[in-house]
Structures are given as C-alpha cells and as structure tokens.
Amino acid sequence: MSKASLCGRGTRGGTGFLALCLVAALAALAPAASSPSSPAATLALRLAEIQPADHPTAKADYEFARLVAERSGGRIRIAVYVDSILGQELSVLEQLRFGGIDLARVSLAAVVPSVPRLAALQMPYLYKDAAHMWRVLEGEVGKELLGSVAESGFVGLGWFEAGARSFYTVRAPLLSPRDLAGLRIRVQENSVMTDLVAAFGALPRPRAFGEVYTALETGEIDGAENNLPTYFSSGHFRVARHFTLTEHARVPEIILGSGVSFAALSPADRELIAKAARDSAAFQRAAWEDYEGLVAERLRDEGLVITPVPDSGPWRRLAAAVYARQSPEVKALVTRIRAIQ
Ligand code: BDP
C-alpha cells in the first residue's frame, strides 16, 4: 500500500475520519543533502475510549500511547480520544471493523454481540475474585479468546481490570432480588446482562452508556449497574443515590485493534503495539486500585451509603438461569474457567 493511499482520504464506511495516516512530513521537509537516509515516516493511530480522562482506564490508554511512542522512538503516535468523542461502544466497534478507528478500549460486553463465545468471560458470579479472573485472562483461555476476535475483524491486544459490577437505584437500596421486581434497569447492549437482570425479576433496558445519566434523571429508568469507579466518574451517583454491592459480574475491559489498520503495519510494529498494550495492563490495575480507594472516600464525603448484600444466596440461585441459556461452546469454556485455581 502506498503512503498516499493511507493518508488524507476518508474511509470505506464514509465517516470522514482519517484513521491511519502515514505522515511523510519529516522526510519531505528534510533537505536531501543533510539526510542521506530518509528518516522513518510517522504513523498516527487513533484510540477510542468512552471513559473520561481521569478514569484509571483512560489513564492506562495514555500510558499505552506513551509506551508505544517511547519504544518506537516517536515514530508511532497514538492519539487517545476519551469521553466517547469517537462514539458509543457499539458504533466504535463498527468503525474499528472497517478501519475508521485504529484502536479501542471497550467493555468485553460490547464485543459479545460480534464474538458470542466471549460471553464465557462475563458470566455472573463466575470468578472467585479478581485474582482468579486474572489467572483466567492471562492463561490459556484468555489468550485463546483474545486471539479469537480476529475472525470478526479485530485484533485482540490485551485486558484491563473493571472491578465487579453492582446495582444502583434511584429510590431505595436492594436488600434482596425481590426489591428489583418490576424496576427498569439499564443494561449494556448484551444478552448475558439482559438475561441476568430479567432472571433477577427486573425489566432490562439495554442502552448505550452515554444515555444512562439522562435516563436516570428523567425517570425513564429506575437504576443501572456498573463498577464503583464508573458510578463515580460518570456522575450517576448524583441521580441514583443507592448503591447495593451485589457484585454480580466481573466484566473485563478489552483493548482491540482494527484488523484493517493492522494489516497495513509491519509485523514488528504490530508486535511493538501489542506488547505495549499488554504492558500497560499492570499500570491500569494499579491505577484502578488507587482510584477505587479515592472513589470510596469521595462517595462517603458526598453522604452516599453503599449497602452490602446481606445474603448473596438468592442472587446466585437466580443467576443460574443465565448459565442454562448459553451455547455448548460457552458452557465448555465456563467449565474450563471454573477448573482454573
Ligand atoms: C464501564 C466500562 C465501559 C462500558 C460501561 C457500560 O468501562 O467500557 O461501556 O461500563 O456500562 O464500566 O456500558
């Protein structure tokens, strides 16, 4: 592919975004006499993130970009677009598929409609704890599943921490699943989450993340579910004051590349980027932990009470229905995950 074909034109999807731009500006500007060998061209890539800049996941995107710039001697630049500037997650994934966006950090839940077997990693009450999830993600199952996104046009680059998800509601905390009966609960646009919330007796309302604040504020929904850092950084705590620690699912974050963008890179650059993504995960996990502590403190200052669940038994029993609905492939993966100590 020529430099010109990578630069200065819209993409096939017609979004008008300039995705992967090979800038030969340095080479063009340098007088021939003073540069016997032309300096390497600069590669500009765009990464989509829906979290705000101070969220630990976004901070790790910046760290990823920093590592890539450092290790490539400034030749590969990743511009991080936070706060959903490039769109909500399902639209970002579409753009990623045709190369309109080069990189994205999204919730695994958003990828499941494209790669259904990934549902195995987000099943309710699946992991003993975060350490167990990380043994799975960094082990054979995690590597296999990360690689399997290739068949949908993505390049699986790495995993980030996303804590455990719990419910938050406008009117009252939830002491048992009975308190969820008939409540309209926003879920990610994902079948496992829809089925789970329905199994708990609530009315699932799939929505893009960016719509949740207003939906809570206007009373269109009665609650939602997410991890504490996101509950805080999104400001949802201002409109839904009751957070109940159900911790019903751990849904890892995933860093993806666009198969189209990556096809235009050299194998060495692909590996450099993939390694930097993996390496930024340690930074992200540390930033996550710090932020969780800070958020707990800030929410306390705000006068918010986080209600523990008195008995997780009824929640777990109802969640079993979601397992029964899975494909044989997902069920087999779940068995492997459970066998990991
Ligand atoms: C947050 C994830 C984000 C998801 C969001 C959601 O970081 O990627 O899109 O949840 O609920 O925890 O949609």
Image (spheres, rainbow, N blue to C red):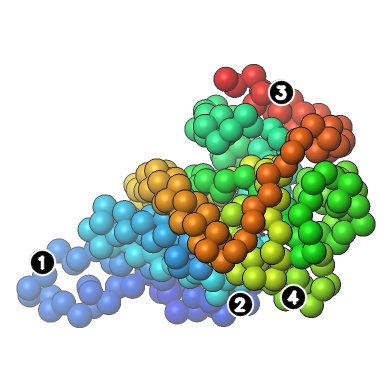
Q: Secondary structure at mark 2?
A: loop
Q: Nearer the viewer, mark 3 or mark 1?
A: 3
In the rendering, at what x and y percent does residue 158 appear? Answer: 49, 45
Dividing the picture into quadrants, the one containing residue 182 is: bottom right
Q: Position of residue 324 (x, y in %)?
A: 86, 32
Residue wearing tag 1:
36
Would you say residue 189 is visible in this rendering?
A: no
Cα distance between the residues tagged 1 and 2:
39 Å
Respond yes or no on whether mark 1 lies under 8 Å from ligand 1. Answer: no
What number is the disc on residue 335? Answer: 3
Q: Between marks 3 and 4, how big is the CA–CA gap?
A: 41 Å
- Please tell me which of labels 3 and 4 falls first in the chain: 4
| Front disc: 2 or 4 | 4
Dot 1 or dot 4, earlier in sequence? 1
Q: Amino acid at mark 3?
A: Thr
Residue 199: numbered disc: none
Few, some or many C-alpha atoms within 10 Å of disc 3 (few <14, some 14-19, many ≥20)?
few
Q: Residue at x 42, y 55 (%)?
A: 60
Q: Is residue 183 left or right of residue 1?
A: right
Quadrant hosting residue 173: bottom right
What is the quadrant of residue 304 in the picture?
bottom right
Three-letter residue code for mark 4? Glu
Assign a secondary structure to mark 4. helix
Image: 136 above or below 148? above
Left or right, 44 with respect to 231, comes to left
Circle 1: residue type: Pro
Residue 217, which numbered label? 4
221 left or right of 52? right
Q: Say which element carries label 3.
A: helix
Q: Amino acid at mark 2?
A: Thr
